[in-house]
Image: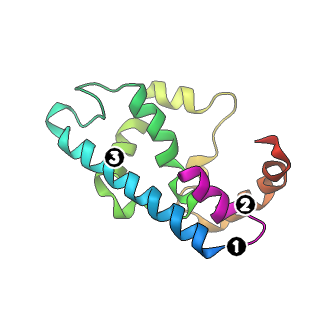
Amino acid sequence: MQGQSNHFYRYAPEKIQYGIDRYQNETRRLYSVLEKRIQDQESNGGYLVGNHVSIADFSCWGWVTWSMWAGIELDEFPILKAWQKKLEERPALVKGRDVPEVSKILELRGDKEKMDAYAKESSAWVMKGKL
């Protein structure tokens, strides 16, 4: 769903508000599911599965971290935002995040102008099917 949100919000040659709204709302719904799961798991460490970090956390972290790429701010999901930050403190996540090259996410996050410039720069190769 977030991939579709990314497409309609960032890359679609024609801005179709219905598509943007539909997929942003569905992404928000899924974020609320993640947030509820993390909240329910708080007594087990606040991870998605059991009392330990797992591939489920790392897989979801990538999508959640790029939420603003889809036009969604995490401020409306404080538990999910705290989980994201907790994972970012793990050295293994930092090491993996920067393979094969240093990720631009931390540089872009919270700076709409930089993000929009990066989106414009990257949209040419994304739309040519190189993503």
Which residue is denoted by mark 3 in the rendering?
34
Picture coordinates of residue 91, whole percent (x, y): 45, 27
Mark 3 Cα shell of 10 Å, populated few (<14), some (14-19), many (≥20):
many
- Identify the magenta region: 1-14
Q: Residue at x 30, y 57 (%)?
A: 78
Main secondary-structure element of the magenta-colored stretch = helix
Going by the image, does 89 lie left or right of 37?
Answer: right
Q: Magenta span has 9?
A: yes
Which residue is denoted by mark 1 in the rendering?
15
Disc 1 from disc 3: Cα separation: 28 Å
- Quarter of the view holding residue 70: bottom right
Whichever of labels 1 and 3 marks the residue nearer the N terminus, that label is: 1
Picture coordinates of residue 7, whole percent (x, y): 66, 57
**Mark 1 falls on what kind of element?**
loop
**Mark 3 falls on what kind of element?**
helix
Picture coordinates of residue 96, whole percent (x, y): 55, 27
Depth check, front residue: 13 or 99:
13
